[in-house]
Image: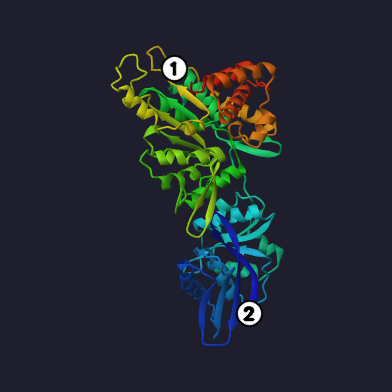
């Protein structure tokens, strides 16, 4: 009996990868082939793919009872990416091999070809975070995605016969032919404390198209520069959605981890992984269910747009249960989703942007149109947003109507340069998070006030009955305004401008 236990693969458990040790035994008995270790239907079907691919490569099955074990056996294994590893254990059972603690990933075609699957990139990225270094053999189809992951040694092949050749030799020159170099992104970047941050100067929608609305554009700039949640309130057609859709193109740069995490979420949700340094923009309809927003059997919108933008247009018309359930992920920047046999934690560090009319008919702020709503209807409309929910929003912008005399005053390229300078200021200060996502400890460290500013803050607390959360948000907004002005310390004018964006 020959037994091999040093060939590895992995499976998804919740949101992370778990290493799977693949073992094989060849024992006397009626010829058979079985896979044990709690594999799902895709793994059980792999028996036929393995048989076909081995026979195509002129392998003769010995008259033995072949058993493949996937350990640990208490974890459900899923995915066809385990095909290649199981086939190699069978093909090499009677040969001298050099597995060298390799991880092998790949689905097998009936002709023995190695194929990519959506889970390979996710699994290797998750494993790379757990280990300092690892060796992987993957299909050539997977190279474009996997080569972006650091701290791994990548070897690639297109079929089973080449993989057999690879593990049958320790010749460095032969193995070097399978070696794939890790690739960097071909985007503009800035380097801060030995870490690269990537960005793209592409503005599909430009702020130069927005006429007037100086206050709203200023609020949008502060929101993007510090990752502050923002609410635009104004009459229909005043530019709320227009401004929001342009904010995604001036977002701060992304580091390698954020880009890979975005691509991982794409792969998990069934989309093609996107490696562009562009942050996700998600705008669910107000009829969306609580499960689709927060997550249930599938990943929710708030996790899909992690490190990106979540936009709620017509905010009061969203289900009240959805809005109230958003309070926790907006505050804690994470959500715990309970499923039948597991609990999965997702990061939710998104920029929350929302828009609403001032009343049901939308004409309350209009100077030319008459509002058709009575006081009861207006109060009922606004009461759909609770005080605790509004307390999670850093900036509230009341937008004016468009005037014929209004002209564009700033474009996206100019705003993006300001955002980049503000981003540099935050990182050089030693911050790991944006100003809008600072913890209480970080607020005390980075948002200090002099005596004059403290007097203004004390008056504001009394006059506007600010909660502890509102005070912290005001300090974080003032810190961002100071950064935009390239000021080392928060000044009176920064604090006063931050106060101007609070709801009275």
Tell which residue pokes out farthest to the bottom in this image.
29
Q: Residue at x 64, y 17 (%)?
A: 455
Q: How is the image coloured?
A: rainbow
The total of numbered circles placed on residues is 2
Mark 1: few/some/many CA within 10 Å (<14, 14-19, 20+) = many
Q: Is residue 141 visible in the rendered structure shown here?
A: no
Q: Residue at x 58, y 22 (%)?
A: 461
Tell which residue pokes out farthest to the top in this image.
405
Nearest the camera: 398 or 444?
A: 444
Quadrant assignment for the N terminus: bottom right
Mark 2: few/some/many CA within 10 Å (<14, 14-19, 20+) = few
Tag 2's secondary structure?
loop
Nearest the camera: 10 or 164?
A: 10
**Horizontal side, residue 310 vs residue 179: left or right:** left
Q: Residue at x 63, y 67 (%)?
A: 166
Q: Residue at x 42, y 38 (%)?
A: 283
Front position among marks 2 and 1: 1
Expressed as whole percent of the image width and height from the top left, the position of residue 221 reads: 53, 25
- Asked if 435 appears above or below 216 in the picture, the reply is below
Q: Which mark is residue 358?
A: none
Which residue, given by chain and number where applicable, does mark 2 sit on? 94
Q: Is residue 322 visible in the rendered structure shown here?
A: yes
Expressed as whole percent of the image width and height from the top left, the position of residue 75 reads: 55, 65
Tag 1's secondary structure?
loop
Q: CA distance from mark 2 to mark 1?
A: 77 Å
Which residue, given by chain and number where applicable, does mark 1 sit on? 212
Nearest the camera: 380 or 409?
A: 380
Expressed as whole percent of the image width and height from the top left, the position of residue 361 reads: 31, 25
Expressed as whole percent of the image width and height from the top left, the position of residue 27 reads: 59, 84
């Amino acid at each position: 009996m020959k037994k091999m236990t040093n060939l590895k693969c992995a499976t998804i458990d919740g949101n992370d990868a778990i290493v799977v040790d693949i073992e094989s035994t060849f024992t006397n008995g009626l010829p058979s082939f079985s896979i044990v270790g709690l594999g799902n239907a895709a793994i059980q079907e792999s028996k036929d793919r393995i048989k076909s691919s081995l026979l195509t490569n002129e392998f003769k099955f010995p008259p033995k009872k072949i058993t493949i074990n996937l350990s640990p056996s208490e974890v459900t294994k899923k995915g066809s990416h385990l095909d290649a590893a199981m086939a190699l254990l069978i093909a090499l059972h009677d040969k001298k091999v050099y597995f060298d603690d390799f991880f092998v990933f790949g689905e097998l075609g009936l002709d023995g070809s190695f194929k990519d699957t959506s889970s390979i990139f996710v699994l290797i990225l998750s494993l790379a975070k757990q280990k300092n270094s690892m060796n992987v053999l993957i299909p050539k189809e997977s190279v474009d995605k996997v080569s972006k992951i650091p701290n791994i040694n990548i070897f690639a092949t297109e079929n089973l016969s080449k993989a057999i050749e690879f593990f049958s030799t320790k010749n460095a020159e032969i193995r070097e032919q399978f070696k794939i170099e890790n690739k960097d992104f071909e985007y503009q970047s800035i380097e801060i404390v030995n870490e690269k941050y990537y960005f793209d100067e592409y503005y599909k929608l430009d702020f130069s198209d927005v006429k007037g609305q100086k206050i709203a554009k200023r609020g949008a700039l502060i929101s993007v520069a510090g990752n502050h949640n923002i609410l635009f309130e104004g009459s229909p057609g005043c530019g709320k959605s227009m401004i929001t859709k342009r904010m995604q193109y001036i977002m701060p740069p992304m580091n390698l981890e954020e880009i890979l995490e975005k691509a991982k979420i794409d792969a998990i949700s069934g989309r093609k992984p996107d490696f562009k340094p562009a942050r996700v923009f998600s705008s669910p309809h107000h009829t969306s269910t609580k499960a689709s927003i927060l997550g249930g059997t599938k990943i929710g919108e708030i996790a899909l747009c992690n490190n990106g933008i979540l936009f709620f247009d017509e905010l009061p018309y969203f289900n009240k249960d959805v809005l109230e359930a958003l309070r926790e992920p907006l505050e804690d920047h994470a959500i715990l989703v309970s499923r039948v046999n597991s609990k999965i934690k997702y990061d939710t560090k998104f920029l929350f942007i929302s828009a609403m009319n001032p009343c049901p008919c939308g004409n309350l702020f209009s100077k030319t149109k008459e509002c058709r709503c009575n006081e009861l209807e207006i109060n009922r409309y606004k009461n759909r947003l609770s005080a605790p929910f509004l307390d999670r929003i850093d900036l509230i912008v009341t937008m004016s109507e468009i005037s014929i005399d209004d002209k564009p005053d700033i474009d996206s390229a100019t705003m993006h340069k300001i955002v980049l300078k503000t981003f540099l200021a935050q990182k050089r200060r030693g911050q790991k998070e944006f100003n809008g996502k600072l913890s209480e400890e970080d607020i005390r460290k980075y948002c200090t006030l002099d005596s004059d500013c403290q007097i203004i803050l004390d008056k504001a607390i009394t006059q506007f009955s600010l909660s502890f959360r509102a005070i912290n948000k005001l300090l974080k907004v003032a810190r961002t305004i100071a950064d935009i002005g390239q000021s080392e310390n928060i000044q009176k004018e920064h604090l006063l401008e931050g106060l101007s964006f609070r709801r009275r």
